[in-house]
Image (cartoon, helix red, strand yellow):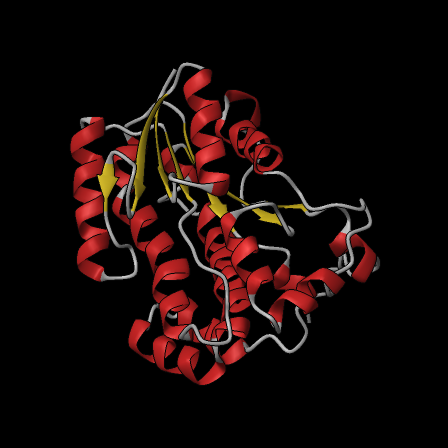
């Protein structure tokens, strides 16, 4: 049994993951804006550092797993800069800040929360993805506000997926026994999706989103994959992004994966 920290643990996928891990006998350190062990606003640098410090204090300097679930979706009246700071920097800075504690575990894992919108949202703003992966929060926030939060959402999730894949194979991560992976859920029955559905414009578009399985996902279904990736049977999985979306990605781009590696010139 291990100690695992989860942000966004008060509701949705984070809460379902915390409940499952607790039932399996793990110790969970929850982080959210309310109703968890640690209260912190991860959209602000001081909130991120406070969360890191409190997690390190709570785990005694050794952490077996981390799941950054905290995030917001795009809405017509929500600033894109908020998603930039919370969805991307609120995940990446905590992953980096907890690396030492994860390295002290005999076998630790991080599972990032991405989204199938990374591959199914047309016109994704790559300028924003580049600013995010460059680590320039000020520039990314400015682009996010210009872009708007509806398109900033998939951009933040793509940037997170790319950060995880790039770093997962490095000496600092798998070289220290830390497995970095991510999941890309589709439309799931959470408060975040309910918030989008309540919007008179966005809600109609969400209901048109194709779901071959014929229904939205359930938080418990997503949590099951997260818990597997945190466990001992997933140690050979490094740098992967798993789509859990009822078939949406496969429907919209059946021939885009696997892509062929070009011949070096």
Quadrant containing the N terminus is: top left
| Residue under the point 28% across and 43% down | 34
User: What residue do we see at 25% from left, 33% from top?
Assistant: 37
Q: Please say if 38 is above or below 115.
A: above
Total marks placed: 0
Q: Is 106 on the left-hand or right-hand side of 237?
A: left
Residue at the location (65% across, 51% down)? 186
Along the viewing direction, whichever of 209 and 113 lies nearer the viewer: 209
Against 64, is 84 above or below? Answer: below
**x and y percent of residue 167 in the render?**
44, 51
Q: Specify whether residue 31 is in view.
A: yes
Q: Is residue 42 left or right of residue 155?
A: left
**Is residue 61 shown to the viewer in this render?**
no
Rendering coords of residue 91 (x, y %): 37, 52
| Quadrant of the rendered image containing residue 121 | bottom right
Q: Nearer the viewer, residue 9 or 119?
A: 9
Answer with the quarter of the image where residue 82 lies: bottom left
Left or right: 234 as drawn, with respect to 133: right
Residue at 43 percent across and 47 percent down: it is: 170
200 vs 261: above or below:
below
* Quadrant where the C terminus is found in the figure: bottom right
Query: Can you give x and y, in whole percent of width and height, for residue 59 in the image?
Result: 23, 28
Residue 3 drawn at (x, y percent): 33, 24
Q: Nearer the viewer, residue 134 or 79?
A: 79
Q: Which is more toward the observer, 261 or 45?
A: 45
Could you say which quadrant of the image residue 15 lies in?
top left
């Amino acid at each position: 049994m291990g100690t695992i920290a989860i942000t966004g643990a008060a509701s949705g996928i984070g809460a379902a993951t915390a409940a499952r891990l607790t039932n399996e006998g793990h110790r969970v350190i929850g982080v959210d804006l309310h109703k968890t062990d640690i209260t912190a606003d991860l959209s602000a640098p001081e909130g991120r550092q406070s969360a890191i410090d409190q997690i390190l204090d709570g785990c005694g300097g050794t952490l077996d797993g981390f799941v950054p679930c905290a995030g917001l979706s795009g809405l017509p009246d929500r600033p894109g800069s908020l998603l930039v700071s919370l969805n991307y920097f609120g995940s990446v800075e905590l992953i980096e800040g907890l690396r030492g504690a994860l390295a002290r575990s005999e076998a630790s894992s991080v599972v990032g929360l991405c989204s199938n919108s990374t591959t199914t949202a047309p016109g994704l703003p790559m300028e924003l993805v580049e600013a995010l992966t460059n680590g320039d929060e000020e520039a990314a926030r400015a682009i996010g506000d210009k872009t708007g939060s509806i398109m900033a959402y998939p951009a933040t999730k793509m940037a997170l997926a790319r950060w995880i894949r790039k770093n997962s194979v490095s000496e600092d991560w798998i070289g220290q026994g830390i497995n970095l992976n991510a999941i890309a859920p589709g439309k799931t029955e959470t408060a975040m999706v309910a918030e989008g559905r309540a919007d008179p414009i966005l809600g109609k578009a969400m209901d048109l989103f194709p779901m071959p399985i014929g229904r939205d996902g359930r938080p418990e279904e997503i949590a099951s994959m997260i818990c597997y990736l945190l466990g001992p049977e997933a140690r050979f999985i490094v740098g992967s992004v798993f789509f859990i979306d009822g078939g949406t990605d496969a429907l919209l781009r059946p021939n885009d994966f696997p892509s062929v590696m070009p011949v070096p010139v």
